[in-house]
Image (cartoon, rainbow, N blue to C red):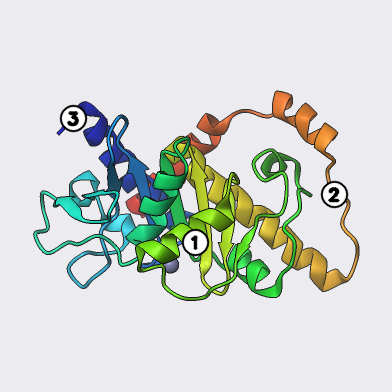
Amino acid sequence: MSAYEGELRELVALAGQVLTALGLVDYLGHVSARIPGTDRVVVKPKHSPAVRGMAALGAGDMVVVDLDGSLVEGPRVESTARPPAEVFIHTEIYRARPDVAAVVHTHQRAATLAGVLGLPIRPVLHVPATFVPDDPPTWPHPVLVDTAELGRDLAATLGDERYCHLQGHGIVSVAADVREATVGAAMLEQLAEAALAGASTGTKPRVITPTEIETLRGQVAGVEGRWAYFCDLAAAGEAR
Ligand SMILES: [Zn+2]
């Protein structure tokens, strides 16, 4: 195992713990990372009675697949673990997007509901607006992404964007880094919550303009601070 792979196993496991602490995943959803310089991907294993929730999974539980979604390396501690049925969400986005090295898929409540309603997720809160400057595209199928063909179709809808709705199902958040894709999912959820709350008032929201977002990007801290804070939340949850 390369040094990269060991580090990515830790990061993917930690991202699952963070998403759990933030209430963005339950036993469903998965995080992956592309091993640099390879066609291999570290991904959270399929949930089963033996493979527990993400809060309980560590680096050694992760599996490694190739871009066909086939298992090339099992976990060190659970011999029955398999890749998720929806591994093609990950592999086909990696195939289509050389710039992407991390994919987060969740069924997070507010963003999923906004996608079901066709409610635009707009940049109305200043920190998340720097992550999600405009409404994500929607892949209009509530089915499981359990074939390469469906994964390719989803990747085509995602295009060059960082987020995509899987209508009636969940979202994907992609980035060049696991931390960024994970924090991005949290930022998307904050704006989705604002969209749902705003829609219930019937009042037109004041949307932050692209020029203001540019200014904000120079003002707000990068992803590191938020990632560290979210990791603290995950660790505190574990300690309880
Ligand atoms: Zn799913």
Q: Is residue 2 above or below residue 76?
A: above
Residue shown at the point (26%, 54%) measured from the top left: 57
Q: Considering only order in the chain, which callout, 2 or 3, is on the residue closer to the N terminus?
A: 3
Nearest-to-viewer mark from 3 and 1: 1
Badge number at residue 2: 3
Q: Distance between the residues labelled 1 and 2?
A: 31 Å
Residue 54 visible at all: yes
The answer to whether residue 28 is above or below residue 238 is below
Q: Residue at x 48, y 46 (%)?
A: 182
Residue 34 screen position, x and y as percent: 34, 40
The quadrant of the image that shows the N terminus is top left
**Of marks 1 and 2, the one in the foreground:** 1
Answer with the quadrant where ligand 1 appears in the image.
bottom left
The dot on residue 63 is none
Of residues 205 and 134, the one drawn nearer to the viewer in this rendering? 134
Amino acid identity at mark 3: Ser
Secondary structure beneath label 2: loop
Mark 3 touching mark 2, by CB under 8 A?
no
The mark nearer the N terminus, 1 or 2, is 1
The number of numbered discs placed on residues in the rendered structure image is: 3
Disc 1, SS: helix
| Left or right placement of residue 41 versus residue 234 in this view | left
Locate residue 39, reporting x and y percent. 28, 40
Give residue 207's mark: 2
Q: Which of marks 3 and 1 is nearer the N terminus?
A: 3
Task: Pick the residue in front: 99 or 174.
Answer: 99
Could you say which disc has been placed on residue 153 in the image? Answer: 1
Q: Looking at this rendering, what residue extends furthest in the top direction?
A: 218
Tell whether 184 sits left or right of 70.
right
* Element type where label 3 sits in the image: loop
Q: How crowded is mark 2: few (under 14 residues within 10 Å), some or many (20 or more)?
A: some
